[in-house]
Image: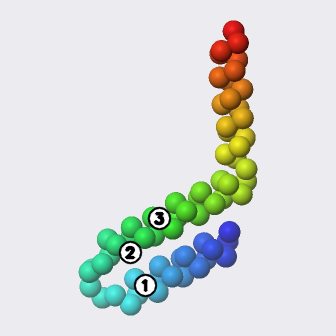
Amino acid sequence: MDKILGFYCNFMARMTAKTDDQRGQGTLEYVGMVIVAALIIVAVLNLDLASSIASKLKEKVDDVINH
């Protein structure tokens, strides 16, 4: 994960250093946000938080239905 984040930071630094004007800056920021969101999703899936949250939610729904 650290290597991916390092690659992303290096990529962003190089991309912003090569452009003197602001053309395309919004697109670059948008791409950066998409990359960060993808990294967060990958991290959550690798930590298995999604299944843990889903099981806890199912548990609570079952408690409400059964009582």
| Element assignment for label 1 | helix
Q: Give the camera-side residue of 40 and 19.
A: 40
- Give the percent coordinates (x, y) of residue 66: 70, 12
| Element assignment for label 3 | helix
**Which is nearer the N-term, disc 3 or disc 1?**
1
Q: How many other residues sit within 10 Å of disc 1, few (<14), some (14-19) or many (≥20)?
A: few
Q: Quadrant of residue 17?
A: bottom left
Q: Are marks 1 and 2 in contact (CB under 8 Å)?
A: yes
Residue tagged by mark 1? Answer: 15
Q: Give the camera-side residue of 20 and 37.
A: 37
Residue tagged by mark 3? Answer: 34
Residue tagged by mark 2? Answer: 28
Image position of 8 with respect to 64: above or below: below
Q: Amino acid at mark 1?
A: Met
- Give the percent coordinates (x, y) of residue 41: 59, 57
Q: Quadrant of residue 60?
A: top right
**Which is nearer the N-term, disc 1 or disc 2?**
1
Q: Amino acid at mark 3?
A: Val
Image position of 67 with respect to 49: above or below: above
Give the CA separation, mark 3 to mark 2: 10 Å
**Which is nearer the N-term, disc 3 or disc 2?**
2
Quarter placement of the C terminus: top right
Image position of 42 with respect to 4: above or below: above
Give the label on residue 4, or none: none
Residue drawn at x 32%, y 76% as measured from the top left? 25
| Element assignment for label 2 | helix
Give the CA separation, mark 3 to mark 1: 16 Å
Give the CA separation, mark 1 to mark 2: 8 Å
Residue drawn at x 65%, y 53% as measured from the top left? 44
